[in-house]
């Protein structure tokens, strides 16, 4: 598994301008990326989400759909991302009373010439933003954080896994 990014910035042209990376010569490979994040809130807000008593409805159900929809639009949001077909995008939520709040995990999969890290990160981010939007009427002090790539597989860059509790890779 890689521990450091590649030596060059692939989105910078020789003249220093930003560019989309040419992936046409790369071979297709199975690719997976897993991103995580969290939203901290008041215990009463977490209870309302758990009991599904918020006026806007099923918070986690809507957040799941929002994350999936956002992942499919990643290349519209991030200027140098390649549009790519997603073969699978799964979001899972964990209610955590110790936080208190909700933890999200987004797993994106495809077979292609470029990875799905950005799609997983966008899905996790938008899912958390949707939770905030749906619960802000009772808790404007919620905080979103720790959004990061937890793992990726496939591609020439090799596999990556974040060590729990650190910014290091294994």
Image: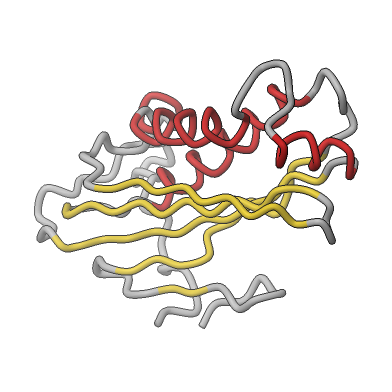
**Residue 131: x percent and y percent?**
67, 32
> How is colour applied across the structure in the image?
secondary structure
Q: Residue at x 80, y 23 (%)?
A: 136
Residue 65 or residue 52, whichever sits in front = 52
Give coordinates of residue 144: x percent, y percent.
74, 42
* Residue 65 percent coordinates (x, y): 45, 30
Q: Residue at x 39, y 48 (%)?
A: 90
* The quadrant where residue 74 appears: top left
Comparing 57 with 118, the one in front is 57
Q: Please indicate whether residue 146 sits to the left or right of residue 108 in the image.
A: right
Q: Report x, y in % for residue 166.
A: 69, 74
Q: Is residue 37 left or right of residue 118?
A: right
Residue at x-position 32% and y-position 74%:
158
Question: In the image, is 115 to the left or to the right of 161?
Answer: left
Residue pictured at 90% horizontal, 32% vertical? 141
Quarter occupied by residue 32 = bottom left
Q: Quadrant of the N terminus?
A: bottom left
Left or right for 71, reference 169: left
């Amino acid at each position: 598994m890689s521990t450091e990014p590649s030596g060059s910035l692939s989105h910078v042209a020789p003249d220093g301008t930003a560019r989309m990376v040419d992936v046409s010569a790369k071979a297709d490979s199975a690719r997976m990326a897993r991103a995580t994040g969290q939203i901290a809130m008041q215990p009463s807000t977490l209870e309302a989400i758990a009991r599904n008593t918020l006026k806007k409805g099923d918070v986690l159900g809507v957040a799941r759909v929002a994350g999936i929809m956002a992942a499919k639009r990643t290349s519209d949001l991030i200027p140098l991302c390649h549009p790519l077909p997603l073969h699978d995008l799964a979001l899972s939520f964990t209610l955590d009373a110790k936080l208190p709040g909700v933890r999200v995990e987004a797993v994106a999969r495809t077979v292609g010439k470029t990875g799905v890290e950005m799609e997983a990160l966008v899905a996790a981010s938008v899912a958390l933003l949707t939770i905030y939007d749906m619960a802000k009427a009772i808790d404007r002090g919620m905080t979103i954080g720790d959004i990061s790539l937890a793992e990726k597989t496939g591609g020439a860059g090799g596999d990556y896994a974040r060590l729990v509790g650190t910014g290091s890779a294994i």
